[in-house]
């Protein structure tokens, strides 16, 4: 019998708690259907509410526990009303990202039928791309939380850092992802998004892309400057597969791309390093709707499917792959049948109703 996968659960704040519960229900059903053992979960208290109560942003030993797990699943962290004394946000998850060197941020952007569609073009139904955002350096390297900005009264400087070590691994990750998508009949093309015509750091980013590209002759490639990419994402997003880019470009374009295919409640996210991975919906804690059964859990549920996909490789058990596919198919079929109508999109289904519907489909009841 396959060993159970060990997962550190960080439900966190606000709707993070609701969508984590929803995800575990769906993931549990998928594992059961595939004859795999239930996840061994360990819940870690962390976030703004925990900080308000205890003065700590994560429970003692929480980071170490996360480091021992096969994967980390996080709901959402942060409440606008709770901050550190210096005004900064409660952000233990950023520390996890640094500590475990989760350099590859993956944001799938996929159009589902009957979900809001912003572009009045039939081809928009075919949007199925991935934003691959470097997540540990770039312009965020000197972000205020790291204390690396140079600040004086007359001038402030932030530094954009592109290192060979991280960038090689990022691009390899992108090409491997392209190979896997190609094997599933999706795209298989990586576009390097940069500003290589202006910045030395970006020319370096592109040069390393070219070096790594030589290792993957079967994968098609392209280049786009980030400004042109913004235009193309609005004009012809269906033409793209994987878009790899520096941290801040990824921050901006992933929101733009997410906006094309619905709302935050559909934005799944995986953050990968060489030895660890963390999965979370890309949305925040949405305190305006917390505890009201209004949150759309699909971003979290789809992040849960990404986690199963990762476990399949990590544990070397193909069955996890099938479990991931079951969830993705359930969401796809649910939308097609107009049986998924999240309140976020003006529908009549709250968090629990959406979860019940996806679970039933995963179980094969529909
Ligand atoms: P953060 O700084 O953590 O990213 P944010 O200020 O960007 O947070 P979010 O919490 O991501 O804000 O969400 C913004 C708004 O979008 C929420 O207030 C909520 O109304 C809506 N929203 C976000 N996620 C969902 C969801 N899963 N279901 C329904 N609505 C959502
Ligand atoms: Mg946000």
Image: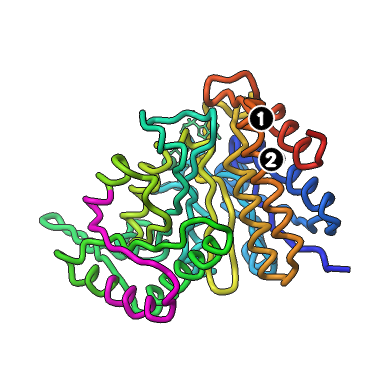
The location of residue 194, given as percent across then percent down, is: 26, 61
Q: Are marks 2 and 1 in contact (CB under 8 Å)?
A: no
The location of residue 93, given as percent across then percent down, is: 53, 55
Within-10-Å neighbours for mark 2: few <14, some 14–19, many 20+ = many
Identity of the residue furthest to the left in this view: 154
Task: Place residue 276 in its image quadrant.
Answer: bottom right
Q: In the rendered image of this protein, does residue 65 appear above or below residue 18?
A: below
Q: Report the residue at 49% width, 50% height from top.
A: 108
Q: Is residue 310 magenta?
A: no
Q: List the residue tagged with mark 1.
A: 351
Of pointers 2 and 1, the one earlier in the residue sequence: 2
- Is residue 267 or residue 121 the one in the foreground? 121
Residue 330 is tagged as 2
Q: Is residue 216 magenta?
A: yes
Q: What colouring does the structure picture have?
A: rainbow
Q: In the rendered image of this protein, does residue 194 appear above or below residue 124?
A: below
Q: Report the residue at 65% width, 55% height from top.
A: 59
Identify the element where label 1 is drawn. Answer: helix
Task: Place residue 167 in its image quadrant.
Answer: bottom left
Residue 327 is tagged as none
Q: Is residue 269 visible?
A: yes
Identify the element where label 2 is drawn. Answer: helix
> Where are the magenta residues, as a range?
206-229
Q: Report the residue at 61% width, 40% height from top.
A: 16
Q: Quadrant of the N terminus?
A: bottom right
The location of residue 172, given as percent across then percent down, is: 45, 74
Gap between marks 2 and 1 measured at Cα: 16 Å
Q: In the rendered image of this protein, does residue 202 appear above or below residue 278?
A: below
Q: Is residue 96 visible?
A: no
């Amino acid at each position: 019998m396959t060993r159970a996968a060990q997962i550190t659960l960080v439900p966190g704040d606000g709707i993070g708690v609701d969508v984590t519960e929803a995800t575990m229900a769906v993931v549990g059903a998928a594992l059961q259907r595939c004859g795999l053992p239930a996840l061994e979960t360990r819940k870690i208290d962390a976030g703004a509410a925990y900080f308000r109560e205890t003065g700590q942003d994560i429970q003692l030993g929480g980071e170490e526990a996360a480091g021992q797990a096969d994967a980390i699943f996080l709901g959402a962290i942060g409440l606008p009303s709770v901050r550190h004394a210096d005004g900064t946000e409660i952000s233990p998850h950023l520390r996890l990202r640094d500590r475990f060197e989760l350099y590859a941020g993956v944001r799938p952007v996929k159009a589902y039928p009957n979900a809001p569609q912003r572009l009045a073009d039939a081809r928009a139904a075919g949007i199925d791309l991935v934003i691959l955002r470097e997540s540990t350096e770039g312009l965020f390297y000197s972000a205020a939380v790291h204390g690396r900005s140079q600040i004086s009264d007359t001038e402030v400087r932030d530094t954009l850092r592109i290192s060979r070590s991280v960038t090689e691994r990022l691009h390899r990750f992108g090409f491997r992802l392209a190979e896997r998508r190609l094997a599933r009949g999706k795209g298989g093309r990586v576009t390097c998004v940069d500003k290589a015509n202006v910045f030395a750091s970006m020319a370096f980013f592109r040069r390393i892309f070219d070096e790594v590209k030589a290792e993957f002759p079967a994968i098609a490639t392209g280049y786009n400057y980030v400004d042109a990419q913004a235009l193309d994402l609005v004009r012809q997003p269906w033409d793209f597969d994987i878009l790899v880019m520096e941290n801040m470009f990824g921050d901006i374009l992933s929101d733009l791309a997410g906006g094309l295919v619905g709302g935050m409640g559909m934005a799944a996210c995986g953050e990968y390093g060489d030895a660890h991975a963390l999965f979370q919906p890309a949305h925040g804690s949405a305190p305006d709707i917390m505890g009201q059964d209004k949150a759309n859990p699909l971003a979290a549920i789809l992040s849960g499917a990404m986690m199963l996909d990762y476990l399949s490789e990590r544990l070397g058990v193909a069955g996890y792959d099938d479990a991931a596919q079951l969830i993705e198919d359930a969401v796809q079929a649910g939308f097609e049948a107009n049986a998924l109508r999240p309140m976020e999109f003006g529908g009549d289904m709250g968090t629990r109703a959406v979860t019940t519907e996806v679970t039933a489909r995963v179980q094969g009841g529909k």
